[in-house]
Image (cartoon, rainbow, N blue to C red):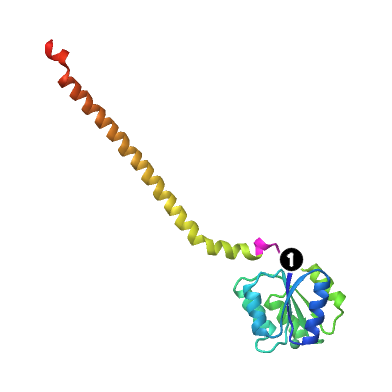
Amino acid sequence: MRLLVIEDDKDINRQIVAALEHAGYAVDHALDGEEGHFLGETEPYDAIVLDIGLPKKDGITILEAWRASGRMMPVLILTARDRWSEKVQGFDAGADDYLAKPFHMEELLARIRALPVADAWTLWGGALWRAALPCVAVMAALGVWTMVAVFSGADNGALDIEGTLIANVEQSEQLDPMTQIQ
Ligand code: CA
């Protein structure tokens, strides 16, 4: 499982990354919204921990942008304590779960384990298929073209063989010495 942690508080970021790595996850991290948005858009993460209050680009904006572009990996948002509006905004933007600061690391680990982690095909298969579709279309067109060429070529060949046979019969009748004698 590969995770991304986007949190601008360096201490909290480091603690989360350390706990997740200790739990056996491969973890990338970002300290601002722009970098985090880019990583989540381009790398195949199994889940993302996303702080809402971030410099350069806030967590809600990032999450909405991912969902709008079809990125459906599970996202757990980190909200400020007692900011219920952040939780509502987060769920509206497509968050799968939230944790209010301050939190116990054990609870974060438990919530990540409980996330509906999708398999790689669900997350990336759709995108791969869309990318491959033009290639499949070209190959299908080439296949049809090849079949048409083979069949029309076979028809021409049959006609040629018949034509040659008929010509040979006519030629042999004309040149048959026995026929001339009788
Ligand atoms: Ca923050």
**Which of the 4 image quadrants contains residue 39?**
bottom right
The part of the chain drawn in magenta is 118-122
The residue depicted at 27 percent of the width and 35 percent of the height is 160
Q: What residue type is labelled 1?
A: Val
Farthest top residue in view = 182
Could you say whether the residue bearing mark 1 is in a helix, strand or loop? Answer: loop
Mostly what secondary structure, the magenta segment?
A: helix
**Which of the 4 image quadrants contains residue 12?**
bottom right
Q: Which of 68 and 154 is in front in this view?
A: 154
Q: Which of 83 and 15 is in front in this view?
A: 15
**Which of the 4 image quadrants contains residue 101?**
bottom right
* Left or right of residue 19: residue 43: left
Residue 128 appears at what percent x and percent y? 58, 63
Image quadrant of ligand 1 equals bottom right
* Left or right of residue 158: residue 104: right
Magenta residue check for 152: no
The residue depicted at 34 percent of the width and 42 percent of the height is 152
The residue that label 1 is drawn on is: 117
